[in-house]
Amino acid sequence: MKRTSITIMSAIAMVMLLQSFTINSSKKENEEAISLASKEVSASALNFENMKAAFKGETTASAKYAAYSKKAEEEGYHQIALLFKAASKSEKVHANNHKAVLLNGKQEVPELAPDFMVKSTKENLKDAIAGESYEITTMYPDFIMNANKAGNQFSLMSLNYAYKTEQKHKPLYEKALAALESNNVKSLPSVYYVCPTCGNTYDTEAPGRCGISMTDSEKFIKIDTIMS
Ligand SMILES: [Fe+2]
Ligand SMILES: [Fe+2]
């Protein structure tokens, strides 16, 4: 009799232990699921904040480079004016792509009045190189990493288009600055092509298809005049 009661008590204790384990383990699973879901929500929210910042940056860069183009022409640096004009069109493509991602995600598109200073062409080139460097080394790699976490394919495409293009703009500006400093501006290219899909920028000659977005080069925007 005594042994039977001990066995029953042991069985009850075992059931209680198992129940407690099941409750604890399902609570842990729930907590993990909630934590994962909130991480996804915050990655998604951060991604749209990043897209807004990128839209602002590209809109400002486009307006700034258009102003720098005028300044270069005024200073007699026609080839540098063409480069700034091509880059301005390219940044506009990026701004429009980022805007499309925001609209597709039912996000508000920020209203903005671009704020920048126009200095000498030499200083403007240095400013452009600094801007492109920041985008290549810091801004776009961070934004792309988070867009990946958020799983937003449109953001990834739009951010990568800009990231890859800015990597081409920087050496174009560096080449222009070197030519300016060595009094050799006229040796710089006098025709540029901009891809309307991704903003990719080619000087002198364009390949059959864009090296970033595969767009047919017949659709490229040709820049060989500062008019229009
Ligand atoms: Fe750029
Ligand atoms: Fe392209």
Image (tube, rainbow, N blue to C red):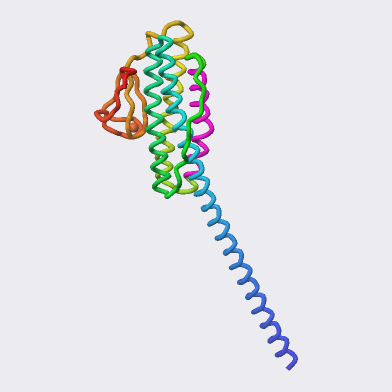
Residue sitting at the far top:
183
Q: Position of residue 96 (x, y in %)?
A: 38, 37
Q: Is residue 101 above or below residue 123?
A: below
Q: Quadrant of the N terminus?
A: bottom right
Q: Position of residue 134 (x, y in %)?
A: 53, 29
Q: Nearer the viewer, residue 87 or 162?
A: 87
* Magenta: main secondary structure: helix
* Left or right: 78 as drawn, with respect to 222: right
Q: Position of residue 52 (x, y in %)?
A: 48, 40
Can residue 131 be found in the magenta stretch?
yes
* Left or right: 184 as drawn, with respect to 7: left
Q: Is residue 154 above or below residue 165?
A: below
Residue sitting at the far bottom:
1
State the residue at coordinates (69%, 80%): 13
Q: Nearer the viewer, residue 228 or 42?
A: 228
Residue sitting at the far right:
2
Ligand 2: give its quadrant: top left
State the residue at coordinates (57%, 64%): 30
Q: Position of residue 41 (x, y in %)?
A: 52, 53
Part of the protein shown in magenta: 124-147
State the residue at coordinates (52%, 46%): 46
State the residue at coordinates (38%, 38%): 97
Q: Nearer the viewer, residue 19 or 223?
A: 223
State which quadrant residue 159 falls in: top left
Q: Is residue 224 above or below residue 10?
A: above
Q: Quadrant of the C terminus?
A: top left
* Left or right: 218 as drawn, with respect to 80: left
Q: Is residue 129 above or below residue 178?
A: below
State which quadrant residue 87 falls in: top left
Can residue 1 be found in the magenta stretch?
no
Q: How many marks?
A: 0
